[in-house]
Image (cartoon, rainbow, N blue to C red):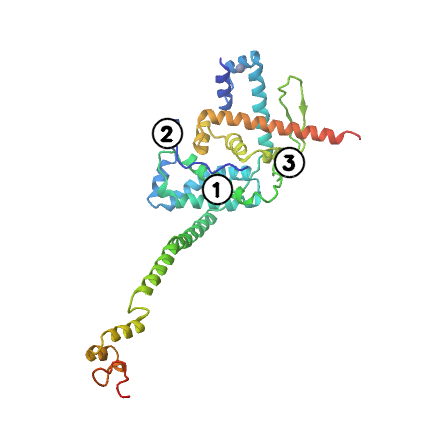
Amino acid sequence: MLAPSLPMSGVLPELAAADDPDLALVLRVQQGDAAAFEELYYRHQAGVSRMVANFVRYPEVVPDLVQEIFAKVYLRFDSYSPRLPFRPWLYRVASNHCLDFLRHRRRQPLQVSTTMEDDPTREWTLPDPAGERMQARLVARDLAGKLLLELSPRDRMLLVLKEINELSLEEIGAITGLRLSAVKVGLFRARKRMLEKYRKSERELERRGKPQ
Amino acid sequence: MRCQDFQDRLERRWDDFQMRAHTEECPACQERLALVNWSRQVMLAAEQNVTPPAMAAVWAAVRRATNTSWEFSLTRSFRRLAPYLVAVTVLFIVVAAFQPGIVTSRPSRYASALAAGPDTKVASVLDPDLAPQKPGDVLGIGGR
Ligand SMILES: [Zn+2]
């Protein structure tokens, strides 16, 4: 089930708009300065593109989505109040846009995309909450992508914002409309669920590998 | 150090002496640390890198969105007004049906002319055909 759109109001007290490094540019855009908007775009294009690509995971639609997000932001500048720093506001618009996209596309089967990284044999150690030492090697990054895709949009969004975009807990709270404690709990649960899915797929592989 | 402080620092990517000391004595936080590290590695492995669109493409999207929103608001305004337009039209038809002289003017005119009786002035003004040839010949049967 897809998450509802993220709320467009609500500010976390931890985030002070006065310290916002984008504030001067934002005010210029609100005065109709197109060059200031272009500067904001160059500042945030990479981050938003990473967020969209890793959350949506349809590489072919990412450029279109990113363009639409920035167009939306540009046309909504009148309604933007600097009570909330620009970056969380931008990511909130982006998150809602991605959720809308997934909602429209949910009947189509999900595809596991292959990333363009040049290290296909990355391996990592798995934690072993039960106490026994367990090591596993994930040979294909597709498995990592599949694990991420199998999460709910909400879990995936939290993990992408935290681990891919490296946003602060406060910013994630402002983007998702969650309290700080809820962000922490949400991240923990998302990780747990990802691990459960991994273990399940491992058991599945083991079962299939056994001779009949 | 409390477990809650450890977990908070862990999410903020801190790594200090106090935290390391805590994991040595707290299996729950040790497990949490392993989970966080593992999921970070999965996320890094799953990461997709894309090239952001050019600025010109963003401006084109702005133009498209502006056109779409203008057309959309026009359609939406019409959709909002449509029930009122229908209601006003229906009301006009109903009112008109009961208003003498608007839709059913001819029968009413004859009726009032008949009611006017021998007043030839009124009858002739209303319809020259109704003007009697002579007094008392309102129905035009006088010459028989
Ligand atoms: Zn602890």
Looking at the image, the residue that sits furthest to the front is B144
* Residue A187, image x, y percentages: 52, 27
* Residue A183, image x, y percentages: 48, 27
* SS of the residue under disc 3: helix
Q: Which residue is rendered at x = 54% and y = 35% of the image?
A: A153
Q: Which residue is rendered at x = 67% and y = 28% of the image?
A: A137
Q: Please tell me whether residue B104 is drawn above or below residue B30 in the rendered image.
A: below
Say whether residue A59 is left or right of residue B112: right
* SS of the residue under disc 2: loop
Residue behind mark 2: A16
Quadrant into which the N terminus of chain A falls: top right
For marks 2 and 1 on the same chain, the one whose residue lies earlier in the sequence: 2
Residue behind mark 1: A97
| Most foreground residue, B98 or B75 | B98
Looking at the image, the residue that sits furthest to the bottom is B144
Distance between the alpha carbons at the discs numbered 1 and 3: 25 Å
How packed mark 2 is, by other alpha carbons closer than 10 Å (few <14, some 14-19, many 20 or more), is few
Say whether residue A176 is left or right of residue A54: left
Please, what is the three-letter code of the amino acid marked with disc 3?
A: Asp
Residue behind mark 3: A142
Which chain is disc 3 placed on?
A
Q: Is mark 1 within 8 Å of ligand 1?
A: no
Which chain is disc 2 placed on?
A
Q: Which residue is rendered at x = 55% and y = 26% of the image?
A: A189
For marks 2 and 3 on the same chain, the one whose residue lies earlier in the sequence: 2
Respond whether the residues carrying marks 2 and 1 are from the same subunit.
Answer: yes
The image quarter in which residue B25 lies: top right
Respond whether the residues carrying marks 1 and 3 are from the same subunit.
Answer: yes
For marks 1 and 3 on the same chain, the one whose residue lies earlier in the sequence: 1
Please, what is the three-letter code of the amino acid marked with disc 1?
A: His
